[in-house]
Image: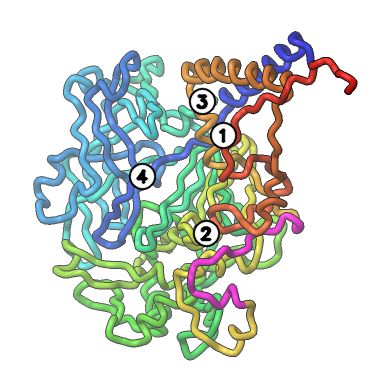
Amino acid sequence: MNVASAIRSLFLQLISLTAITLAAQVFIVPWDTASFGPDGPWQAVKITLGGNDSTKYINFQNVTEVSVYPGGSWSSNTFTKAACEEYPDSLCGAGGTWDPDPDQLLDQKIQFREPWVIDESGLNVPDMRHIALGLTIGGKTVWNATLGTFDTGNITYPNGRVGGIPLGQLSLGATKETAQEFTTSDLSADAIKASMFAGQLYKDKEIPSYSYGLHIGSAAFNYPGSLAFGGYNKGRVIGPVISFVNDTWIDLLDIGIGVEFGASPFSFDAKDNLLSTEQTKAKHNALSPYISLPRKTCDNIAKLLPVTYDSDLKYYLWDVNDPLYSKIVSSPAFLSFKFAPAAGESDNVAIKVPFALLNLTLEHPITDSPRQYFPCVPYEGSPVLGRAFLQAAFLGRNWNSGMSWLAQAPGPGAVREGLGEQYVDIADADKIIEGFQGQSLFNQSWQGHWSIIASKSTSDKPEETKDTQPQDAKSPDASEGHDSEGLSTGAKAGIGVGAAVGAAVLVGLSIWFWRRWSTAQKGSTATLSRRDEKFSDQINPQGYDTGTNEHRYELPEHVSVEPVEVPDTNVPYTRS
C-alpha cells in the first residue's frame, strides 16, 4: 500500500466513524440504587429538574436531582417541600422534592392548572401547576420541558390512612405529540409549547423513534430496572411479544397459578379460572403499586395461599409463621396472567409473576411495623396491573406507529441483568419487536434465586436445571435463528460521544491509524486469535449465549503485545 492509498483508507474509516457517532441511538435512562416504600420495595429513575438558560451549563444553574417512578404520559410531575409539611412522619419526599427557582419562574406564562389523580393508588393532587423548565436525564437536557409541580397532595391507602407522596413521576411520552401545547388566550399564536423528554429527543433526531421500552426490575432481588427511549433492552424480553393498539388497555383473559419447574408447593400442579369475570379490559400502570382486581378474584387467589385479609388494613397479609409461606415464596411457583395471542400466533400468552416477587412489605404510614403482604388489592373499577405485576413484565410503546407491547421479563439471571444487556433500536414505523425465544429461558433466568422442590420429574431433568446456584445457563441458540440485535452497552457508550469530543477522538485516531500503517510497512506483526475457537468453553459475562452468528477477533485478554520491529531484510546477501 502506498502513502496515497493509506491516507485515503484512513479518511474513509474516519468518515464512517463520524457517521456512526452522529447517528440516532437508544437513550438509556439511569436508575437510582435506592429503593422506596411504603408498599414495595420499588425502584426509581434519576432526573434533574430546573434551568432555563440554554447558553449555560446546566450544573451552573439552580437545579435539583430527584428520583421518580417512570410511567404516565404528558407532563413529568414533582412536588415542593411544602407538600410534605403536613406529613412529617411519612415517607413524603423520599425521592426528593423540588422547589423551582423563583428567578426561573419569573418568565413562566403558562396559566393552566389541573388536578392529578390516580384512583387505584389513592393519589390525589387537587391543584397542579404546569411550567416549562429544563429536564436533564443522564447528562442530556431538554429545555422547556413540560413539568407539573404542586404544594399540596397526598395518598390515601386502602385502610384509610393518609400519607405524603414519596416520589413524583417521569412521563414516557404521549400520542404522536412531541410537545404539550398550552394556550394563554384565544389566539393560537399565543400558545406555549412544552416538550416531553422523549418527544424532544426524537424531534432532534437523537433517538430513532418516539418510543420506549420498560422493565422495572425488582428491588428485593437487587435486579435493576431498564428504561430506554428510542429502543429497548432485548435482554429483558422473552417472546412471544404481545402487540396491542391501545396505550394503556389490554384484554385480560384469565388468571391462574402454576409451577415453572419441579414439584408444586400446593396440593395441585396448576389452577386456572381464578378471574371472577369473563374476559375483561385491564390497564397497566407503572405509577400504581398494586395488582388491583375485583374482590372476588383476590379471594379466589387468596384461598389457595397462606394469606388472610386484614379487615382493618384492607390488605392480604402473608402468614409468615405458616411453613407453606416460605415454601411458596422461595419456589418456582407463579401467578399467571393470560392474554390474547401475539401477532401470528394461535396460543394465548401467559405472563408469569413468581410469588417471590409478590412477597412485598407494608411500612409506616400504612402500618405501625413492617408486614409482609400479597399485593392483590380489591378494586371496584377495571383491573389495574401495577408495579407488582410489572416486576415480571416488559412494557413498550411506539407512539408514532400506535403500537404497544407486553412480554414476559426474565428473572435476575446470573449477574442480575436478566438475559444480558442488549439494547435494540425501535424503528419509526415498527409495529412488532422481538424477544429471545426459548421455553427454558424463564426458568434459567431464575436459577440461583429460587429453591426447586424435588420430585421424580426434576430428577429426570438435566443437572444444570436442578441446581439452585447461579450457573452459566444456555440461552437462545443461533442455529435456531435467534440472532442478536443492537449494540452492546460498551458500544453504546463508545459511540455516544458529543461532536466536540468526537473531533478530538478523530484526531487521535488519525495518529493511531497512521502509526499502524507505518508500523505495518516495517513488517510488525501480532497474531490474532479467533474468540469462538480460543475461548469456546466461555460465554458472555451475563452467563447467556446471545445467539449471534458473528465472530469476534481480538487479542487474548492476558496478553499485552507491543510493536516489534523485525530485522532489516535489506542486508546484502553474501555467499559463504
Q: Is residue 118 above or below residue 500?
A: below
The answer to whether any part of residue 402 appears in the image is: no
Of discs 4 and 3, which sits in the foreground? 4
The tag on residue 209 is 1
Which callout, 2 or 4, points at the residue further toward the start of the chain?
4
Give the residue pinned by disc 4: 45
Q: Are there few (<14), some (14-19), or many (20+) residues within 10 Å of tag 2?
A: many
The spot of residue 211 in percent (x, y) is 53, 39
Which callout, 3 or 1, points at the residue further toward the start of the chain?
3
Relative placement, left or right, of 536 versus 183 is: right
Q: Are there few (<14), some (14-19), or many (20+) residues within 10 Å of tag 4?
A: many
Residue depicted at x 36% and y 21% = 192
Relative placement, left or right, of 416 versus 54 is: right
Residue depicted at x 47% and y 57% = 415
Please give the range of residues in magenta: 463-480
Q: Is residue 568 above or below residue 29?
A: above
Which callout, 2 or 1, points at the residue further toward the start of the chain?
1
Image-quadrant location for residue 136:
top left
Magenta residue check for 469: yes
Magenta residue check for 76: no
Give the residue pinned by disc 3: 203
Give the residue pinned by disc 2: 409
The amino acid on which the numbered mark 4 sits, given as a three-letter code, is Val
